[in-house]
Image (cartoon, grey):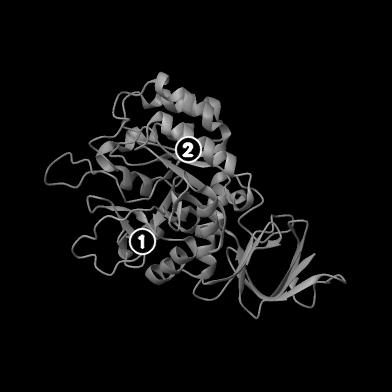
Amino acid sequence: MLAITNAMLIFPEYMMENGTVLIKNGKILDYGYTGKISIPDGCRVIDAGGKYLGPGLIDIHTHAGGDYWFYEEPLKAARAHLMHGTTSLLPTVYFNATREQLLEQIEHIKENSKKEEGRIIRGLYMEAPYLNPKFGADRENNPWKKPVDPKDYMELIEAAGDFAKVWCLAPERENIETFVKDVKTAIPDIVFSVAHSEASPYEIERLMPYGLKLATHHTNATGDLQKYPECRGVSVDETVNYNDEIYAELICDRRGIHVDPYMLRMVLKIKGKNKIILISDACVFDGPVPEGYEGVTDINFDHQGEIAGSKLTLDVACYNMMLHTGSSLCDVFKFASTNPAKLLGFNTKGRIEKGFDADLILVDDKMSVNLVILQGEIIQ
């Protein structure tokens, strides 16, 4: 058994000062005020020194960790995130890959999810194949420009199976509803996400009954339908903000480049604390830094000098969200743990609760990670 004592326990709506958490067999056995929780003889005790203990972070959208792509080195990429407090994640495969490449990536990640640090891999985030090439990498040579066709995608659905937790799509793609129905039939609990898209409200909302309830990196890589040249159109961002059922992913870098700090505050005000999900969207690129971005260290640029994901981990994203929006520690743990767990149906993760998985992290007031516990095991 393991006991963490003298900790400030983080819950979605409040904190508990001088708290203790008891852990047994990888689960949270009990929690409460230190002195009121009985610690069994022989139990290993760690004094938290008054630091903050919260649920492990859950990154639902990440392509890489450190210098490693998940599709190439999933264990090394997973470890890079784990050392920063992410205890569950969904590696992302991307729509610039061919069908054969996607099939290889899916299998490779699946195999490594059963090994060592790979156990934090809880499924796949399918940012492929049917997105809008106008709003993504390699727009000229994208292999998925051709019409939506079951002959092209059924093998992907079969290979991913229920290991796929989120499936992204551009609702404006012709015949996309056929694809959605086939995915839903094979994976009933799948979450669909609008991504790399310039869809109209109607095109998005008609897919919500199938399980579209997420917006991929909200306000990034989306178009703006302009009905009249002199008027702002209504497209993806507005539809996501309007529909209470849709969660909004946010990439929160230090300079507010992916999402302007004012936009972060506005989205938080509109969507509310229960529909925000922080992601890293971490990638590995070494393209030239464009003029005006000198000194930026936590985002990537591709070979054309365009923004291409981040170098973030969720602990850093959480602190950036605190800086840009005034969110509390309780809030950012909700955005980076409780909310993604709820979205994905991870019913024993994302909270300090009896019977929940003992995935916990100890942090200071700036979200610097001091201790990581994965399934009751001390990692660092």
How many residues crowd mark 2 within 10 Å: few (<14), some (14–19), many (20+)? many
Where does the image place residue 223, in percent across and percent down from the top left?
Answer: 25, 43
Q: Amino acid at mark 1?
A: Leu
Q: Give the camera-side residue of 331 and 239.
A: 331
Residues at marks 1 and 2, CA–CA distance in whole angstroms? 33 Å
User: What residue is rendered at 48% in x and 59% in y?
Assistant: 273
Above or below 328: residue 62: above
Q: Is residue 296 left or right of residue 22?
A: left
Residue 105's disc number? 2
| SS state under label 2 | helix
Q: Amino acid at mark 2?
A: Gln
Identify the residue shown where x is 62% and y is 49%: 119
Looking at the image, which residue is at 59% across and 49% down?
118
Secondary structure beneath dot 1 equals helix
| Image point (20%, 65%), residue name | 292
Q: 10 Å neighbourhood of mark 1: few (<14), some, or many (≥20)?
A: many
> Is residue 211 visible in this depiction of the protein?
no
Residue 113: x %, y % from top left: 59, 44
Q: Is residue 143 above or below residue 268?
A: above
Q: Name the residue that disc number 1 marks.
A: 264
- Percent position of residue 77, x then y: 50, 53
Q: Of label 1 and label 2, which has the lower sequence position?
A: 2
Q: Residue furthest bottom?
A: 49
Which quarter of the rendered picture does the N terminus lie within?
Answer: bottom right
Left or right: 364, with 1 as reference point: left
Between marks 1 and 2 in the image, the one whose residue lies nearer the viewer: 2
Residue located farthest toward the top when viewing the structure as drawn: 151
Location of the C terminus (image quadrant) = bottom right
